[in-house]
Image (cartoon, rainbow, N blue to C red):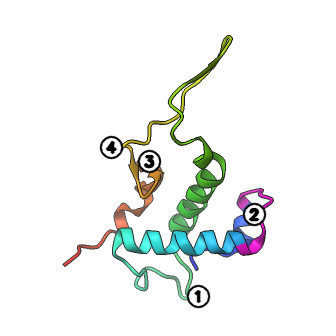
């Protein structure tokens, strides 16, 4: 796994059960590996851990998933003088269901597909 549940809880306060967090982290690991076409074996530390930029990128993806996933699709909301506009998740702004800006950390790890 890219990052452990205990380590994630240092960065994100959540009420989700540990088993749910573990499942989400495993799914994110598979998505990252599939997107980059990279198993990261060459990039791991001596302890068998992923690089810190990959760990923090996954934390940011998980945090976005927990905080913003339910808001996807809302373009604009106005109540009296209160107005809310959310990020547009069309094909040019998103990858794998996440904003492209969150996935920039994966660019150095991309491998060609043959």
Q: CA distance from mark 1 to mark 4?
A: 38 Å
Location of residue 24 in the rendering, given as x and y in whole percent from the top left corner:
61, 69
How many C-alpha atoms fall within 10 Å of the one at disc 1: few (<14), some, or many (≥20)? Answer: few
Return the residue at label 3: 101
Q: Quadrant of the C terminus?
A: bottom left
Mark 1 / mark 3, whichever is N-terminal: 1
For label 2, the residue is: 10
Q: Looking at the picture, how far across and down is residue 9, in whole percent?
A: 75, 64
What secondary structure is marked by label 1? loop
Q: Which residue is mark 1?
A: 47
Q: Report the magenta residues as a range.
A: 11-19
Find disc 4 in the rendering and name its residue: 92
Nearer to us: label 2 or label 4:
4
Q: Residue furthest left?
A: 114
Q: Nearer the viewer, mark 1 or mark 2?
A: 2
- Mark 3 or 2, nearer chain start: 2
Whether pointer 4 and pointer 3 mark residues with C-beta atoms closer than 8 Å, the reply is no
The correct choice, above or below, for 105 with respect to 79 in the image is below
């Amino acid at each position: 796994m890219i990052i452990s549940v205990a380590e994630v809880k240092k960065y994100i306060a959540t009420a989700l059960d540990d088993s749910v967090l573990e499942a989400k982290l495993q799914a994110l690991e598979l998505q990252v590996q599939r997107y980059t076409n990279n198993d990261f074996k060459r990039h791991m530390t001596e302890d068998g851990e992923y690089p810190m930029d990959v760990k923090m990128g996954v934390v940011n993806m998980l945090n976005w998933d927990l905080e913003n996933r339910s808001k996807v699709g809302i373009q604009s909301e106005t109540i009296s003088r209160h107005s809310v506009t959310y990020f547009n998740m069309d094909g040019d702004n998103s990858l794998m269901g996440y904003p492209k800006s969150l996935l920039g950390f994966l660019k150095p790890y991309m491998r060609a597909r043959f």
